[in-house]
Image (spheres, helix red, strand yellow):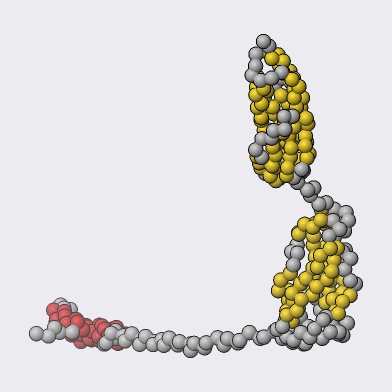
Amino acid sequence: MKKAPLSLVMVLMLVMLACNLPILGVGNRESGQVATVVAKTMAAINSQQAKIPTQPPRLPTPTSFTTQTKAFVPTQIFPPTATPLPCNWATLVNETYPDGTTLNVNTAFNKSWRIRNSGTCTWNTNYRVVFYSGNSLGGPASRNFTQIVRPGETMDIILPLKVPSTPGTYKGVWHLVGDDNVDFTKYGLWVLINAANPAPAFAVTSVGMTVDADMFSGACPHAFHFNAAITTNSAGTVTYYWTRSDDTSSPQQSLTFTASGTQSVAYDWNLETSGDYWVKLYINNPNHQYFAPLNITLACSE
């Protein structure tokens, strides 16, 4: 069952109210007042109903957003630009007498550098190596190349040099110059050596000989005990033997030194007859030399 609109209900209530009002002798005037009230009431109701929407307001349609994806553009990679090779360019391959080599003073030697033509121009015999700085070690001020060297090929530069007479460290630098007289070396070619006095030849420098008692008197036989302190100037092997006044020699023995220094050796001689005797030490290698003699006396008792 449908419900009556609120406005119709209110109108009916007003009509009923008007019918029940007391009649006070003002009949038409009061009825007109009632009609006026009803009319105003209906007008107000209609005015309010006009303000109330008959349908719920429609919500605005949401805006549709479209995500735009930016097209991927790959980064363009350019190949590295090749650095052009210079006309004249030398690189070191190997060398003799590397830096820090120690040589005896006044020693003559040939220093050599093997270099590669790493440029684009061919070297001819008008190219040269020129002394630049340091100590020339007796080497030439300038020397021409001895051969044609094409790009990629190698050649040896050899300079005759000599170690100075004074110990120390020496460095000499040479540069390479093209046939246009232009120096095309950045650091040059150099020799760096240490000059030193020659080590002395291995030798026994001294032998100190002792005996427990150089004279003995008493019952025989008696043994004399000998000792020899052998000193060398460097490392090496010493060979030696003992020799005696009775023309007898001991077997040859050896003594190894790892550096300069002193080592001791011993020898015993048993004697039965009174008399004067001597003992020597012979250094065969390296000296070929006798040391001492050491004299002894024996007096045997009856």
Q: State the image quarter where residue 218 is shown.
A: top right
Question: Does 107 appear above or below 249?
Answer: below
Q: Is residue 55 visible?
A: yes
Residue that appears at 72% across and 29% down: 246
Residue 55 position in % (x across, y down): 27, 87
Q: Is residue 75 left or right of residue 183?
A: left
Q: Which residue occupies the foreground of this view, 120 or 152? A: 152
- Spot occupied by residue 19 in the image (x, y as percentages of width and height): 14, 82
Q: Is residue 263 visible?
A: no
| Residue 228 percent across, percent down from the top left | 71, 31
**Residue 160 occupies which quadrant of the picture?**
bottom right
**Near-viewer residue (103 or 2):** 103
Quadrant of the snapshot with the N terminus: bottom left
Question: With 1 as the anchor, is 98 left or right in this view?
Answer: right
Name the residue rendered at 76%, 76% in the picture.
156
Where is the C terminus found, in terms of image quarters? top right
Q: Residue furthest top?
A: 302
Quarter residue 131 falls in: bottom right
The structure residue drawn at horizontal position 75% and vertical position 32%, both measured from the top left corner, is 280
Residue extending farthest left: 1
Which of these two is toward me, 183 or 60? 183
Q: Residue at x 14, y 81 (%)?
A: 16
Q: Is residue 100 shown above or below 173?
A: above
On the image, the x and y values in percent for residue 202 come to: 75, 46
Q: How many marks?
A: 0
